[in-house]
């Protein structure tokens, strides 16, 4: 049975609901609605509420292409309203008194999909005695576009608006979380996929660095940004294909759906997602991805990937990426030359298993190890992992694929679709794995290191926690491939 809980924070008076030993505050606006001339601009904070806010339901999600047909979405209760006025966040806390560690989790989805509500924080909050925060931020071309490069001086455009939304949410946490029983001096930022890439950006940008104290990166680093010159190329294609050189005001008149459709028509020769964050030369210097690790904020870092990340992209149509071996060798050649491409290509068979391993190393594992190496070499505590547990449900042929860590860490992630990852039958070994992973993650949030059986990652040994039905600690488990990939660095797609 739910009971109301009332607090007063810097943002105003808020009413939440206590349920199952956790108090939930859902759909709290943290920024002014980014509408009209502010559609693509830097976000602004809201004024305090002038009356109590009943934070009983999630706020609108950012406009995005639906994953499900509307009738099916309504049937399972996943038909949440999309609106450009989407800058809201959610808080779960065991109690509004005290000063608990805070976990801010940034959702993934390739910067085109997702919402904070997909990651309910009840279980982690209750289990770990921590405050959990998730957020919505601008997605797609509204949140991630190159228009600031194409129209310099027009303050209606800013690079990486969606990342600036996240920073504004972190400022809200700093200013308000004490009223929810959280400690603003003990904040961990975490994310998976695009959320992990976002965490990397916050680690290396000075405007975000005062706002957190440790970081968790799951399956994504800065190589998944556009280089600045590539962003300009995409921007010029958009300008030409959409007629923006004559009339940039169209960008403010089109609906989100029209904007998405027009941008896809305008940019035809492109691999992957058009709307991605890019190196802007202001928040981020024009450096190569691996160089950023040494320049990141010196905080404890938990970082890793799943063994078969690339199977998700090679097998599913959500985010098309060239998945054949010649295309991946061409990417390596573009980054490091033909000799490096041929050397690396010899590591992988030209079959499904080999292509998945190649794509995983190209986009995820090797850039992650490079970031871990750089951060550890700068003297920071680093804890590196690889998840080898294989999906059991409809996605079982994908192995230890991208995002399989999420239903293991979040008890209610994407319900009722968890069975696509986990299967429908009880699985004691999978349950035990999920328990162990949550214990390690929460120990890190509470105390800056996981449990004692997960040693720190250092360049001399590169000790890595390998999670599976039984866990292991291995020294440099990808040594041959890692050494072969050395010197390959850049923005991959």
Image: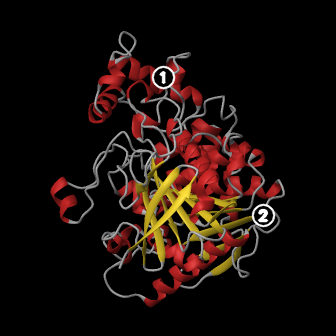
Q: Residues within 10 Å of mark 1 (few under 14, many from 20)?
A: some
Residue at image position (57%, 48%) is 198
Residue at image position (27%, 31%) is 258
Q: Residue furthest bottom?
A: 428
**Image quarter of the N terminus:** bottom left
The spot of residue 357 in percent (x, y) is 52, 60
Residue at image position (54%, 42%) is 163
Give the camera-side residue of 228 and 172.
172
Looking at the image, residue 474 lies above or below residue 55: below
**Mark 1 vs mark 2, CA separation in Å:** 40 Å
Q: Which residue is mark 2?
A: 381
- Is residue 348 in view from this perspective? no
> Is residue 162 left or right of 72 when viewed as pictured?
right
The spot of residue 464 in percent (x, y) is 69, 71
> Is residue 414 left or right of 293 when viewed as pictured?
left
> Is residue 469 left or right of 26 when viewed as pictured?
right
The spot of residue 50 in percent (x, y) is 45, 45
Disc count in the image? 2
Q: Which residue is mark 1?
A: 156
Give the camera-side residue of 493 and 329.
493
């Amino acid at each position: 049975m739910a009971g109301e809980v009332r607090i007063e924070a810097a943002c105003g008076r808020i009413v939440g609901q206590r349920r199952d030993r956790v108090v939930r505050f859902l759909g709290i606006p943290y920024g002014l609605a980014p509408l009209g001339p502010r559609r693509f601009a830097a976000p602004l904070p809201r004024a305090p509420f002038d009356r109590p806010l009943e934070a009983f339901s999630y706020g609108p999600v950012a406009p995005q292409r639906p994953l499900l047909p509307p009738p099916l979405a309504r049937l399972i209760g996943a038909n949440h309203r999309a609106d450009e006025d989407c800058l809201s966040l959610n808080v779960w806390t065991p109690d509004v008194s005290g000063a608990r560690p805070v976990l801010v989790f940034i959702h993934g989805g390739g910067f085109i999909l997702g919402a904070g509500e997909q990651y309910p924080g009840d279980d982690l909050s209750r289990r770990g005695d921590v405050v959990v925060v998730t957020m919505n931020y601008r997605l797609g071309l509204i949140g991630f576009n190159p228009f600031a490069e194409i129209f310099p001086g027009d303050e209606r455009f800013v690079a990486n608006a969606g990342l600036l939304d996240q920073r504004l949410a972190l400022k809200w946490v700093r200013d308000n979380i004490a009223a929810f029983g959280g400690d603003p001096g003990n904040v961990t930022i975490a994310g998976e996929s695009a959320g992990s890439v976002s965490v990397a950006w916050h680690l290396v940008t000075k405007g975000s660095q005062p706002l957190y104290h440790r970081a968790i990166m799951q399956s994504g680093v800065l190589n998944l940004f556009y280089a600045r010159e590539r962003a300009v190329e995409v921007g010029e294609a958009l300008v030409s294909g959409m007629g923006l050189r004559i009339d940039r005001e169209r960008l403010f008149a089109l609906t989100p759906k029209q904007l998405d459709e027009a941008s896809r028509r305008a940019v035809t020769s492109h691999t992957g997602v058009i709307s991605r964050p890019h190196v802007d030369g202001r928040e981020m210097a024009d450096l190569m991805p691996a160089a950023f690790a040494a320049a990141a904020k010196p905080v404890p870092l938990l970082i890793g990937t799943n063994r078969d990340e690339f199977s998700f992209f090679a097998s599913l149509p959500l985010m098309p990426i060239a998945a054949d071996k010649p295309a991946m060798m061409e990417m390596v050649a573009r980054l490091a030359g033909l000799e490096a491409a041929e050397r690396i290509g010899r590591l992988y068979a030209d079959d499904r298993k080999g292509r998945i391993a190649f794509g995983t190393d190209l986009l995820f594992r090797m850039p992650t190890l490079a970031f871990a190496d750089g951060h550890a070499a700068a003297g920071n505590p680093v804890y590196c992992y690889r998840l080898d547990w294989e999906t059991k449900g409809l996605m079982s042929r994908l192995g230890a694929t991208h995002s399989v860590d999420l239903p293991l860490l979040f008890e209610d992630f994407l319900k009722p679709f968890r069975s696509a990852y986990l299967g429908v039958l009880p699985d004691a070994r999978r349950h035990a794995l999920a328990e162990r992973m949550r214990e390690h993650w929460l120990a890190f949030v509470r105390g800056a290191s996981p449990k004692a059986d997960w040693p720190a990652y250092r360049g001399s040994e590169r000790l890595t926690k390998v999670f599976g039905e039984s866990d292991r600690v291995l020294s440099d488990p990808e040594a041959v491939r890692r050494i072969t990939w050395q010197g390959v660095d850049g923005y991959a797609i």
